[in-house]
Amino acid sequence: MRTLSTCMALSVSFVLAVQAEDAFAKVAYKEVAVTNGGTVQGKINFSGAVPNQPTELIGKDNEVCGNGEVTPNPVQVGGGGELAGVVVFIEDISSGKAWSTTEFTLNQTKCTFEPYLQVMKKGAELTIKNSDPVLHNVHPYEIIGDKRRTIFNMAQPDLNQVNTKKIKTRRSQVVQLACDAHNWMSGWIYVQENPYNAVVGADGSFSIGDVPPGDYVLKAWHPVLGVQEQAFSVDANGVAQVAFDFSAQ
Amino acid sequence: MMRVFEKIALPGTLAAALFVGVAMVPSYAVASTDRPEVNAGLMTMGEKVYGRECAACHGVKGEGDGPGAYLLFTKPRNFDLGVYMLRTTPNGEFPTDDDLFRAVTNGIPNSMMPSFRELPAKERWALVEVVKRLSAIDETPATIDIPAAPQVTTALLKQGEQVYTRLKCAACHGAAGQADGPSSLTLKNDAKERVWAADLTMGVFKGGSTAEDLYTRVITGMDGSPMPSYATQASPDEIWALVHYVKTLAKNE
């Protein structure tokens, strides 16, 4: 018993020592004027059989939320293979254009989150409205690998009430929205330091402008299908074309 | 050299003297013993005690995956994620050192977390420092403000019942607080374990059952669980009325 507990104590010491070395400072993104920026644009496609996503029953508050089954986290593929619900972004860029807005909103309507998917500036505030006459609780989780941690959990019992809360992430860029009162509700927020990002339209297309000339890696993230990346180069006032092809893993 | 029973009896007598008849203090609040200095010696002590008392459930990295965790439901707290249910700090914030000390000292009623009151206070403070490191707690949030409690009258309890309706507590806790609200059927905690809203008629509450404890829970929510914060939804008077009404649901006040 003493050997086991000594062994455990030594393991704890090791863990604590390692954690102390953690967290080197990352260079913060700098907003500058971009006069000769280029554009990176393209389309996201999906190939092969569309996976069957789990469904949930609308089990309560049916007069407000409707009836039947819903797909909380869908894989939405159009007739021509175009994939919607993807965030496209440049991860590593140290300086560039300013965010066009730092006001981000979320609405709960008919027991769904609108928008389902958005990008937010890291550490920014989210203005949240309850447009339903039922209790919703706004419960964002930071997704860290296969684990999740509550960021906050705020009750909104009243119709049309609006509250503003900061979305604080520590280790991850992926935030999933939930409502404990209505377990089928789901939404996503991708957290970024820089504003070079876009949520693709229903036709799978995207366009990101004012990119300082240079070489970059463009990433595309889908809440269910994961992330892909492609290198690209853009000249001054030029256009770079990038296409992504997702499929079920 | 103090004998063990003397170590317990003296602080206990002092604690009893302090807490009799003090309305605003939780019923089993811990005596605020002198904090030991945080230094390498304390950390070494803490690591040793953690290895002996905590790691079996919480795991050596504090990820809630110790060798004994398979016996427990819900799983032990994952300190690495830094999310704590029982705090006197606002929703989404870290706990204070006192919050952690209280959990280690009293345990958590209606849960798998036992009391470690028999450990000397210095060892429990050492454990607080170890847990803070495992959670990378790098700030001390301000505690919430709890204003003076009103007198409990029939009118107050009636108001409390109305607040219970207005805040829609019944969605999870049920109309009579029996944990049978429609949303209670699908609740999950952060670890995606199936959990239930508290049965308010049981009279046992994880964070303590005094009015001040319940006030704190409603304002701060219970991070890691489905219980949200109502901090922006009601006035302090309304929350006091609510918690006193909730205490009547247990009928053993």
Image (cartoon, coloured by chain):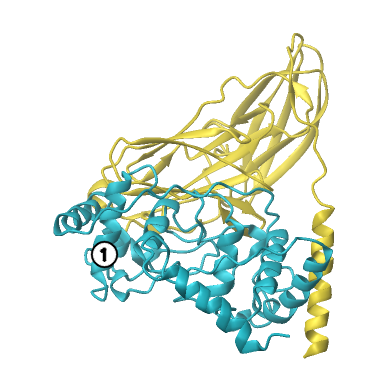
Picture coordinates of residue B198, whole percent (x, y)? 36, 68
**Residue situated in front as seen by the camera: B146 or B171:** B146
Asked where in the image residue B67 lies, by quadrant, the reply is bottom right
**Residue situated in front as seen by the camera: A192 or B127:** B127
Asked where in the image residue A229 lies, by quadrant, the reply is top right
- State the residue at coordinates (71%, 62%): B134
Picture coordinates of residue A178, whole percent (x, y)? 46, 51
Colour of chain A as rendered: yellow
Provide the residue designation for mark 1.
Answer: B174
**Residue situated in front as seen by the camera: B199 or B1:** B1
The amino acid type of the residue labelled 1 equals Gly
Label 1: how many Cα within 10 Å (few below 14, some 14–19, many 20+): many
Picture coordinates of residue B245, whole percent (x, y)? 24, 61
Looking at the image, the residue that sits furthest to the top is: A35
Q: Which chain is cyan?
A: B
Indicate the secondary structure of the residue bearing disc 1: loop
Q: Is residue B65 above or below residue A225?
A: below
Q: Is residue B12 above or below residue B32?
A: below
